[in-house]
Amino acid sequence: MEVTEKDRYVIRGGNPLVGEVEIGGAKNAALAIVAAAIMTDETVTIENIPDVRDTNVMLEAMQSIGVNINRINRHTVEINGSMVKNVNIDTESIRRIRASYYLMGALLGKYKRAEVPLPGGCDIGSRPIDQHVKGFRALGADVVIEGGIVKAKAEKLTGAHIYMDVVTVGATINVMMAAAMAEGKTIIENAAKEPHVVDVANFLNSCGANVKGAGTDVIRISGVSRLKKCTYSVIPDQIEAGTFMYAAAVTKGDILIRNIIPKHLESISAKLTETGCEVQEFDDAVRVVASKRLKPTHIKTLPYPGYPTDMQPQAGVALALSEGTGTITESIFENRFRYVDELTRMGANIRVEGNTAFIEGVEKFTGARIKAPDLRAGAALVLAGLAAEGTTIIDNVYYIERGYEDFDKKLRRLGAEIRFTDAGEDMMKTKFKVVS
Ligand code: UD1
């Protein structure tokens, strides 16, 4: 069913979440990898793609330029980019997702031309693309932005030495993709080290590219003229996993989160341990047990391996329920505290000054009617609703469904009373029947 802006979650809070949850593939890695898959004329098979709106919009946009997409099952897709008809992507939906910019790097690398609308995505602050443009220009492309469209073209791409002025995941991946098919060697300095940067490099290498150093701050790429087919499985989603870790923390629950890479979750595990949760790591699982009131802590978002900005609102919800005063400093995006007003309606006591939130913990939240302001903040507010006394109604769940597959279903299996209702449904009649 198509989810619209009018759809909502109705949550009756108070149940500790207990049980096991399986984590899906990383949305942000999958978005870049499916784009990179068009760089070979052979058929690439990508497994573990999350079935969420953003990845589906991306695949549709790719289809609109002639890429053959064959969905083998819910999470596996075959992609063949040999029939790409044009390098001008202009579907309405692609403007809504941030990751559309990965088609620039992929198309420019393969066809030396790309025209892609300026990226949309969550309104979490100004999201410049100057480092992407700088990287493409360094590789020899002419890049102009006209009528909201980024137009890049080159006679040929030539390897270059590029220093990123800020640590950026998007520009690192984008330039890495284009450089994979440039002539000669490229060095990207001050590269982002996020797990999905490594995942995209591994994917490109599986297709025959020569990318070394991903996961460190210097990436070295020797361009190749052709990429070939491969079968590749996307890494687990660090942020989905982290969100369920916080679900255990705020509901005083006990959740075993399976199919994850514990190393990717270290900063989150460390902060949850500081707040008094018990975090047990296994080979490919992590268990979070929260038996007592949370303790406050101080968090600053940073590029990986620092604490992820995409896990900031979830931490905000936990600190708002802790025994004392904690702080969160957001150093990546300037507009990521939009959940604070919503949380205040539920009884939270938070003051934001500049890029820091001073959070005085309260004993409990009470249910309220609130709105998801963006993807991660929306998920965090669901956690708040699950921890709250009474009923919480969250509007705009459209945002949440951009990045979480079966979020309500997975939560219900852990004992949550959460129900998706469409706009037409009579709220007063909402029953909390558990159907998964
Ligand atoms: C990606 C993720 C997003 C996550 C973010 C940081 C996707 C689709 N989105 O976003 O969920 O929150 O990484 O982990 O993968 N910047 C510039 N110039 C640029 C590019 C970025 O100044 O050309 C700045 C940004 O404003 C921001 C910082 O660099 O302050 C980091 O941004 P970046 O890592 O690029 O984030 P995104 O790729 O947009």
Image (cartoon, rainbow, N blue to C red):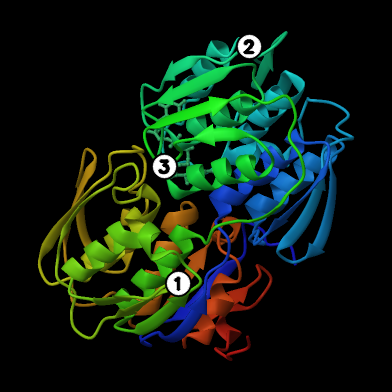
Query: Residue beneath label 3, please?
Result: 215
* Residues under numbered marks 3 and 1 in contact, where contact means CB atoms less than 8 Å apart: no
Q: Earlier in the sequence, mark 3 or mark 1?
A: 3
Circle 3 sits in a helix, a strand or a loop, which is it?
A: loop
Query: Residue beneath label 2, please?
Result: 141
Q: Nearer the viewer, residue 278 or 89?
A: 278
- Residue 147: percent from left, percent from top: 67, 17
Which residue appears at 23% of the width and 76% of the height?
277
Residue 188 falls left or right of residue 356: right
Bin the neighbour count of mark 1 within 10 Å (Cα to Cα): few under 14, some 14-19, many 20 and up.
few
Instruction: Say what amino acid the circle numbered 3 marks.
Output: Gly
* Residues under numbered marks 2 and 3 in contact, where contact means CB atoms less than 8 Å apart: no
Q: Earlier in the sequence, mark 1 or mark 2?
A: 2
The mark total stands at 3
Label 1, label 2: how many angstroms apart (C-alpha)?
A: 42 Å
Q: Nearer the viewer, residue 117 or 162?
A: 162
Residue farthest to the left?
Answer: 324
Instruction: Say what amino acid the circle numbered 2 marks.
Output: Ala
- Residue 77: percent from left, percent from top: 77, 56
Label 3, label 1: how many angstroms apart (C-alpha)?
A: 20 Å
Which residue appears at 86% of the width and 35% of the height?
82
Quadrant in which ligand 1 is drawn: top left
Q: Quadrant of residue 363?
A: bottom left
Circle 2 sits in a helix, a strand or a loop, which is it?
A: loop
Query: Residue beneath label 1, please?
Result: 284
